[in-house]
């Protein structure tokens, strides 16, 4: 098989250049859903970066019009049993926590929609730049499966009432409001998103790496005490929600493009 074709088909692309690693979720037709395969690929990539001294900054990007639409409801529906659903969310929570544990700062480069666990992924990154067309939402509540795990990361970025507003309404939050609320650091024109993200990555990459790594570690140690327990609780809560009759009904409606249950 042609090497270029192999790269095009890879679920996660990696490009290392001048001390900056760009990871690109590469399932644009699926809105880069966090399937078990995508979670495993992200986990493997992040694990490989832990001891990579050549990389000073990581950019997390996405192919296509949207950043990430969250979990694959068809995959969750097929799992059926709560323990199996919990295992999926445990792997997601592990991957999310690995981002904070990396010695390198991770910058999310966000275009289009970041929904549910996709919004969680943005919130979990150390920094985030968004294009003017970016939108953020945690819509699970509308369909009968409250976004408990996204709430862990979103709730640690936004003021509590802002986070609860997102979680309880499921409304779309535009890029400017996301900036105002603290979900992203900067909003730029769509055509400038790549360049501006790279500019920030280079600026950070010029700082002493050992100092950056130690500073990042200390920041999260004092800010996120108990986050592992929070993810464990939230993973069980969201898994129970998906496994419930209400959650199953909501998944069916969403997948079959019917109105949400009332």
Image (tube, rainbow, N blue to C red):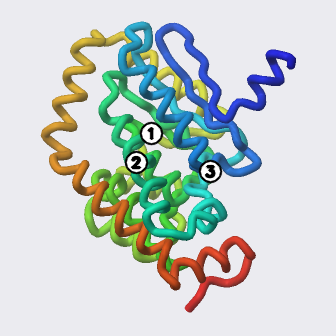
As drawn, 180 above or below 41: below
Side of 168 relative to 215 (left or right): right
What kind of element bears circle 2? Answer: helix
Task: Tell me which numbered mark, 1 or 2, is placed earlier along the sequence.
Answer: 2
Q: Nearer the viewer, residue 26 or 233?
A: 233
Expressed as whole percent of the image width and height from the top left, the position of residue 125 reads: 40, 39
Q: Which residue is mark 2?
A: 123
Circle 1: is it few (<14), some (14-19), or many (20+) Cα within 10 Å?
Answer: many
**Can see residue 103?**
yes
- Quadrant where the N terminus sits is top right
As drawn, 215 above or below 16: below
Compute the Cα span from label 1 to label 3.
Answer: 19 Å
Expressed as whole percent of the image width and height from the top left, the position of residue 99 reads: 38, 35
As drawn, 80 above or below 200: below
Compute the Cα span from label 1 to label 2.
Answer: 8 Å
* Residue drawn at x 72%, y 42% as measured from the top left: 64
- Quadrant where the C terminus sits is bottom right
Compute the Cα span from label 2 to label 3.
Answer: 16 Å
* Quadrant of the rendered image containing residue 12: top right
Q: Which residue is mark 3?
A: 33
The reply to whether dot 1 and dot 2 touch (C-beta < 8 Å) is yes
Q: Nearer the viewer, residue 155 or 81?
A: 81
Q: Which residue is mark 1?
A: 128
């Amino acid at each position: 098989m042609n090497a270029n074709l192999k790269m095009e088909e890879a679920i996660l692309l990696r490009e290392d250049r001048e001390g900056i690693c760009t990871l690109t979720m590469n399932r644009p037709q699926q809105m880069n859903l966090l399937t078990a395969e995508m979670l495993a690929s992200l986990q493997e990539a992040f694990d490989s970066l832990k001891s990579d001294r050549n990389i000073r900054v990581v950019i997390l990007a996405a192919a296509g019009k949207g950043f990430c639409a969250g979990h694959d409801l068809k995959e969750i529906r097929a799992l059926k049993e709560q323990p199996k659903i919990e295992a999926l969310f445990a792997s997601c929570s592990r991957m999310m926590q690995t981002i904070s544990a990396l010695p390198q700062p991770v910058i999310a480069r966000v275009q289009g929609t970041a929904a549910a666990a996709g919004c969680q992924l943005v919130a979990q990154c150390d920094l985030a730049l968004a294009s003017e067309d970016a939108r953020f939402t945690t819509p699970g509540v509308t369909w009968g499966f409250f976004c408990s795990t996204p709430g862990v990361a979103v709730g640690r970025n936004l003021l509590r009432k802002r986070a609860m507003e997102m979680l309880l309404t499921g409304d779309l939050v535009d890029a400017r409001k996301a900036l105002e609320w603290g979900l992203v650091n900067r909003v730029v024109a769509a055509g400038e998103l790549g360049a501006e993200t790279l500019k920030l990555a280079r600026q950070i990459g010029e700082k002493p790496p050992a100092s950056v790594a130690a500073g990042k570690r200390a920041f999260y140690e004092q800010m996120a005490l108990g986050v592992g327990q929070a993810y464990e609780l939230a993973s069980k809560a969201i898994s129970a929600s998906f496994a419930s009759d209400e959650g199953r009904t909501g998944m069916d409606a969403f997948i079959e493009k019917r109105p949400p249950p009332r």
